[in-house]
Amino acid sequence: MRLLIVDDSSIIRSRIARIMGDPRLPSLKIVGMAKNGVEALELFSNAQPELVTMDLTMPEMDGVECTESMARLNPQANILVVSALSDKATAIKALKRGAKGFLYKPFTDEQLIGALLEVMS
């Protein structure tokens, strides 16, 4: 399964990438890492990942708009929003626009693995 990691924080991108090697997860191939929604959409179009981790607060294009665009391009894409925003309205907006799950930052490895498995099932 192909994975795209989208977050404006290089620390979060690296942390998510590191967790992808966990044996509890199916084989995941990271096909790209983006620091904003514009980069993410370009990578999404080219690499066609089945799984995306999506930050909400990013420069150039936010995660809600990016999620909506990805869901239009591929309604089957599994998009997990991973955000520090504790604003429930924004989380609901992302879910209505095509995200399949939501995980609040900060998160533990176990929480991320659980959320990814749930989104993929």
Image: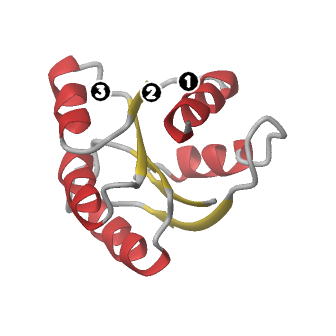
Residue at 29% across, 42% down: 56
Q: Quadrant of residue 112?
A: top right
Q: Residues within 10 Å of mark 1 (few under 14, many from 20)?
A: few
Could you tell whether 88 is left or right of 31 in the image?
left
Q: Given the image, on which type of amino acid does mark 2 rest?
A: Leu
Image quarter hosting the C terminus: top right
Q: Which one is earlier in the sequence, the residue at label 2 or at label 3?
A: 3
Could you tell whether 2 is left or right of 79 in the image?
right
Image quarter hosting the N terminus: bottom right
Q: Given the image, on which type of amino acid does mark 3 rest?
A: Leu
Q: Which one is earlier in the sequence, the residue at label 3 or at label 1?
A: 3
Say if mark 3 contacts mark 1, CB within 8 Å: no
* Percent of width and height locating residue 104: 43, 24
Q: Which one is nearer the viewer's eye here, 81 or 108?
A: 81
Which residue is the site of mark 3? 85
Q: Given the image, on which type of amino acid does mark 1 rest?
A: Phe
* Percent of width and height locating residue 85: 29, 26
Q: Name the outermost residue toward the right.
A: 23
Q: Which one is nearer the viewer's eye here, 90 or 85?
A: 90
Could you tell whether 42 is left or right of 24 in the image?
left
Of tags 2 and 3, the one toward the viewer is 2
Q: Quadrant of residue 29?
A: bottom right
Say if mark 1 contacts mark 2, CB within 8 Å: yes
Instruction: Kindly state the secondary structure of the residue where label 3 is placed.
Output: loop
Which residue is the site of mark 1? 107
Q: Label 1 to label 2, Cα distance in Å?
A: 7 Å
Q: Label 2 to label 3, Cα distance in Å?
A: 10 Å
* Percent of width and height locating residue 25: 73, 41
Name above or below for residue 40 compared with residue 118.
Answer: below
Name above or below for residue 18 compared with residue 30.
Answer: above
Q: Label 3 to label 1, Cα distance in Å?
A: 13 Å
Which residue is the site of mark 2? 103
